Image (tube, rainbow, N blue to C red):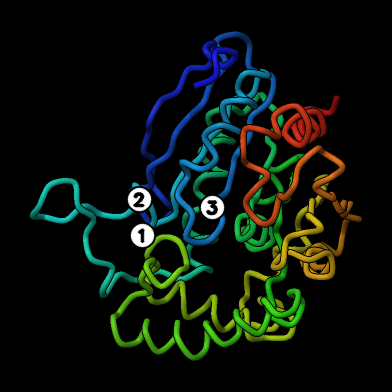
């Protein structure tokens, strides 16, 4: 780890989801005074480890930060009963994206709110992690939220030719393969393995004109409950979280006026950022600093 972050204490923890399922997370704490609490919520099929550098940076600035894995992902996937350090098969594992929000994200917010009840609680959502904010009933506990490449991910709002590749993969490769295997394999190019229900709901949303807003989820009513401040970042070279897609997600928060910012790689001295690049260490003094200062109200 960078020498400048040596004053950060890192602890591997576990906490229960709202239904009792065990979730694994990492807590990043400053050695000095804690001034803010921050919850980092992952993208689909992305383990929490990719957020480690950014979480350490925030802790260095006085934040108590939690990263965690949704059920079926990373260290929140059950281990196999045989073999050394092998994950259990996801065949038959029951989970959906809406479960991730209702059971896992809700629990993570509650855990942070209860543990750091005297600190303002900020929410950082990457891709699906931002979408989940609108689906959880306790989003009223969040004072500030930052979305990083978080969008209403309908294929129609992606850039060409990527949107046609995504549509074809989801419907003609991903869905049949998931039905055949009983889960969505990471080797197909989606990142980590995904539970069947997660991938199928994701594919349904991606194929819908307004993404999750076209579903009949009762949890959609929670979008209107959020009354904190919201800043959504999109990057000009991200083919998935385009500005129209980010704006569509932001429009769901009807009781506030979210701020949507587009960042060009050249503006921060980078050649590319894309959907995942924000979390690279090279952005510590530019993108990371900007988000940290906004989260901390500086």
**Could you say whether the residue bearing mark 2 is in a helix, strand or loop?**
helix
Residue 151 at what x, y percent from top left?
72, 64
Crowd band around label 2 with a 10 angstrom C-alpha radius: few (<14), some (14–19), many (20+)? some
Name the residue: 18% across, 46% down. Answer: 85
Q: Earlier in the sequence, mark 3 or mark 1?
A: 1
Residue at image point 8% right, 55% down: 82
Q: Is residue 258 left or right of residue 245?
A: right
| Rendering quarter of residue 180 | bottom left
Q: Quadrant of residue 205?
A: bottom right
Return the residue at label 2. 76
Q: Is residue 268 left or right of residue 12?
A: right
Residue found 84% across the figure and 50% down from its top:
264
Do tag 3 and tag 2 residues touch (Cβ < 8 Å)?
no
Q: Measured from the top left, where is residue 225 in percent x and y?
A: 76, 58
Residue at the far front in the pictured view: 271
Location of residue 201 in the rendering, given as x and y in whole percent from the top left corner: 51, 78
Check whether the beta carbons of the residues at disc 2 and disc 1 lie within 8 A of each other.
Answer: yes
The residue at which mark 3 appears reads as: 105
Q: Earlier in the sequence, mark 3 or mark 2?
A: 2
Task: Give how far across and how far down residue 60 sits, in percent.
Answer: 62, 18
Whole-number angstrom distance, CA of label 3 to CA of label 2: 13 Å
Residue 72: mark: 1
Residue at point 37%, 65% (across, down): 193
CA distance for labels 3 and 1: 14 Å
Give the SS element for disc 3. Answer: helix
Label 3 Cα crowd, 10 Å radius (few <14 / some 14-19 / many 20+): many
Occupied quadrant, residue 204: bottom right
Asked if residue 219 is positioned above or below residue 47 in the image, the reply reads: below
Q: Secondary structure at mark 1?
A: loop
């Amino acid at each position: 780890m960078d020498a400048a972050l040596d004053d950060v204490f890192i602890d591997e923890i576990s906490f229960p989801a709202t239904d009792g399922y065990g979730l694994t997370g990492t807590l990043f704490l400053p050695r000095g005074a804690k001034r803010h609490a921050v919850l980092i919520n992952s993208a689909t099929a992305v383990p929490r480890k990719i957020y480690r550098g950014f979480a350490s940076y925030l802790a260095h600035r006085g934040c108590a930060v939690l990263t965690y894995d949704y059920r079926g992902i990373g260290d929140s996937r059950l281990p196999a009963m045989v073999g050394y350090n092998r994950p259990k098969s996801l065949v038959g594992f029951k989970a959906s994206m809406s479960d991730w929000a209702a059971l896992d994200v809700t629990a993570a917010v509650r855990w942070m709110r209860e543990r750091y009840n005297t600190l303002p609680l900020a929410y950082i959502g990457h891709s699906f992690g931002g979408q989940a904010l609108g689906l959880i009933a306790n989003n009223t506990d969040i004072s500030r939220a930052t979305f990083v490449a978080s969008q209403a991910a309908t294929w129609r709002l992606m850039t060409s030719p990527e949107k046609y590749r995504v549509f074809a993969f989801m419907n003609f490769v991903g869905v049949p393969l998931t039905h055949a295997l009983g889960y969505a394999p990471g080797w197909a190019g989606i990142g980590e393995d995904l539970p069947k229900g997660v991938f199928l709901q994701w594919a349904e949303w991606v194929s819908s004109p307004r993404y999750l807003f076209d579903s009949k989820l009762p949890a959609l009513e929670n979008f209107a409950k959020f009354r904190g401040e919201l800043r959504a970042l999109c990057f000009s070279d991200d083919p998935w979280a385009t500005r129209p897609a980010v704006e569509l997600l932001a429009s769901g928060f009807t009781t506030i006026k979210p701020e949507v910012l587009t960042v060009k790689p050249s503006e921060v001295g980078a050649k590319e950022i894309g959907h995942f690049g924000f979390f690279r260490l090279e952005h510590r003094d530019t993108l990371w600093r900007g988000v940290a200062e906004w989260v901390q109200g500086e």
